[in-house]
Image (cartoon, rainbow, N blue to C red):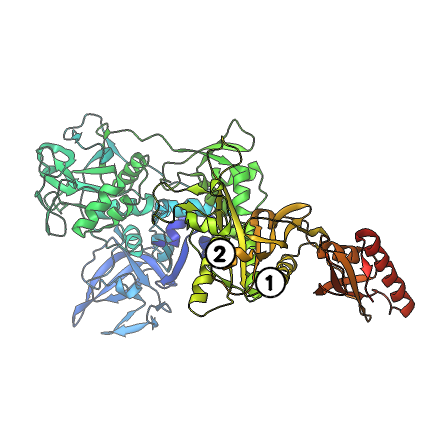
Amino acid sequence: MRVPVSWLRDFLPDAPPVDELVRVLPTLGLAVEEVVQVGDPLDGVVVARVLDIAAIDGADKIRLVQVDAGGGAEDPVSVVCGAWNFEVGDLVPLATVGTVLPGDFEISQRKLRGVVSNGMLCAADELGLGADHAGIMVLGQGEVDGLEPGRSFVEATGLGAEVVLDLEVNGNRPDCQSILGVARDLGAKLGLDLVRPEVRYPTSPAGSAGGATTVEVEAPEGCGRFLTRVLTGVSVGPSPLWLARRVELAGMRSISNVVDVSNYVMLELGQPNHAYDLATLPGRGLRVRWAHPGERLVTLDDVERTLSGADLLICDAEDTPVGLAGIMGGASSEISDATTEVVVELAWFDAMTIARTSKRLNLRSEASARFERGTDPEVLEAAAERVSTLLGAVGATTVADADVVVGAPPARTRVRLRTARVNALLGTDLGDDVVVGHLESIGFTATPADAPGAFDVDVPSWRPDAALEIDMVEEVARLHGYDRIPKTVPVSGHTGHLTAYQRARRRLRHVVAGTGVSEAWTTTFVSPADLDRVGLDRAMSLSVTNPLVADESQLRPSLLPGLLTAAAYNTSHRQSDVCLFEIGRTFRRPADSGARLPDEREELGVLLAGHDAVAATEVWQAIAEGLSLDPASIELVAGTVPGLHPTRSAQILLGGQPVGWVGEVDPAVVGAYALPGRVGWVTARLDLLLAERPAAQLRPISRFPSSDVDLAFEVADSVPAAAVERTLREGAALVVDVWLFDVYRGAPVAEGHRSLAFTVRFQAPDRTLTDDEVAEARSALVAAVSSTHGATLRS
């Protein structure tokens, strides 16, 4: 939108310089795309009155003109002029000697046909005010207010150099498609008073002949309000220079005073309007209705258009279309030089109706651009007053009591606004008074609500875009100033992240894979025969009513059958000694017979074909270390469970709670699956294994040397090696690590006993250990194991 700065200053007389306007407007969401300098200062050009016109001997194309340039008739200025379109008494622009006109054309004293010319009477193009060079620019005739001879032409006419701001107005700011809207925002931002144009115009007596008109609105859903005003005594002709120039600076073509005033009011107040020649309007009335499918209308651009039932029409009282509502008038009632009486139509149309018609017909106008974004339903009367004022200045008279208004403005939108919400979204700490002050400066009305810090905000009629609380927040941000809002990174909820349990499960998978075991997937369904081969009780499993495969009718109660089947398949294909693991769900009948859902668990199963219980224990130790489990909380207790070796298996206790098993698969089960050698096995419940625990405490690493001591104990087979290891770890303060490196049965070890050989590492955090300190710690460990487990130290 093109905004002449002088027009803007009509509303804001105290507006700052252009540079400041250019800085402030973008902060209000109105980007300045271009600053255009139009015209020249025209210093030295004054208003002059023609006093006398005389012929020059020997010249038939030029005349000697005597003008009053401020000195009166007693001190006229002689000018030689070749134009013939003015008369004595006319007011014209005079470029005095020394004036530099556009194009660096300097006026000097010249002698033509023996006559001295002391200046030049100017045409519009010579002043840079248009392309007209048909004759001298005639400013008026006789006495005209403001056009006193000798007065600066620029001051008298306002037609000097002008700055035009080309603004980018987004679709969500329909109010700023007018000079008033831009001025309103600027005034609020800069704290300036908004000055409204003066309304003053002549009216005819009430009930004057010819003033009656009728209005019918048959499509209220498309036209919510409709107003007509009648003016008589209209004399169609050129517009006043200042008005024509402003219309053209704003990007529209000057046509005639009536049309220009219509466009001027639209540009100034944002309300499109249309003037019809009342003498050519059958029935002296207007009707608003939907078009009949296939109906035709010739618009002002002389194009015949075929309409549909979704198009809104303005018709005369005899139902003949005279205009396409909100877009363009028809040619039949166009204003002409013979027009003396006009009816001005102002309306509030449904935005989507206008937008659909404009798009379908590929017909876009300045009016449609405003209607399809939403106009102010309450501005119709003010726009009509402005039309009367501007046409009244050129002789038109408004017919009193002839206005017809159909429809009432809709209720204003009310929005609940919370100061806390404003501050939360903007990252500010604004008080209630600041928030309310910003909104009220641009016409919003805030009333305290029933909750602290909340307000019911009535949205002004010119802001159809503001309908939600977030819209109110945006208004506060604009007026407070984005540059005054601190930069913060908003905190948003994390979506799509892994839970602590999922992260721990992923870590477990990486740890097991890191031991050289391959991950496998086995079916959830097993056959009753598989349960029998592993030694699992069928009564604990769940049967499937409609199994995919008839033989696989049971939900697996353990991961062992599936992994044994996978190992057997690999062995049958000469891939023996495979090591597989799986993380999957198992299903058991619930312990509570009244429970409606099965006992469903997520478990880990690790199968080590060709490996024994020692290898399985090493995998478990890697898992415990990888999950940062506290070694002191881990205990392996010898026990029996279906499917595992009766004497080479142990239950895993974590903090005294059973979480799984480690050991070897029962040789009978191994044989049933035709697997060669031993098979190690580790299983654990993930919900117990991965339960959140206090983070492991990190200890500093000693910089001093360590000492290793090997200790071999003869203990009964019933004593778990893990119990002996735990006693060694806790038996002396200098012990930093313990590991089992040998298990032996046979002579000279007694029957029912075995030899367990451990390496114990001693280390101090602050010194190098002496031989006596190591010996003393060694003796303490031997005594502790002997007394606790009845063990004997082997030599």
Left or right: where 780 falls relative to 737: right
Front residue (pair 252, 369): 369
- Dot 1 lies on which element? loop
Q: What's the residue at 25%, 45% (across, down)?
A: 261
Q: Position of residue 484 (x, y in %)?
A: 56, 51
Q: What's the residue at 21%, 57% (across, down)?
A: 86
Q: Name the residue that disc number 1 marks.
A: 612
Q: Position of residue 565 (x, y in %)?
A: 45, 58
Quadrant assignment for the N terminus = bottom left
Where on the picture, by quarter, is residue 606?
Answer: bottom right
Q: Name the residue that disc number 2 marks.
A: 20
Left or right: where 669 falls relative to 405: right
Front residue (pair 670, 569): 670
Q: Position of residue 659 (x, y in %)?
A: 61, 48
- Dot 2 lies on which element? helix
Identify residue type, mark 2: Glu
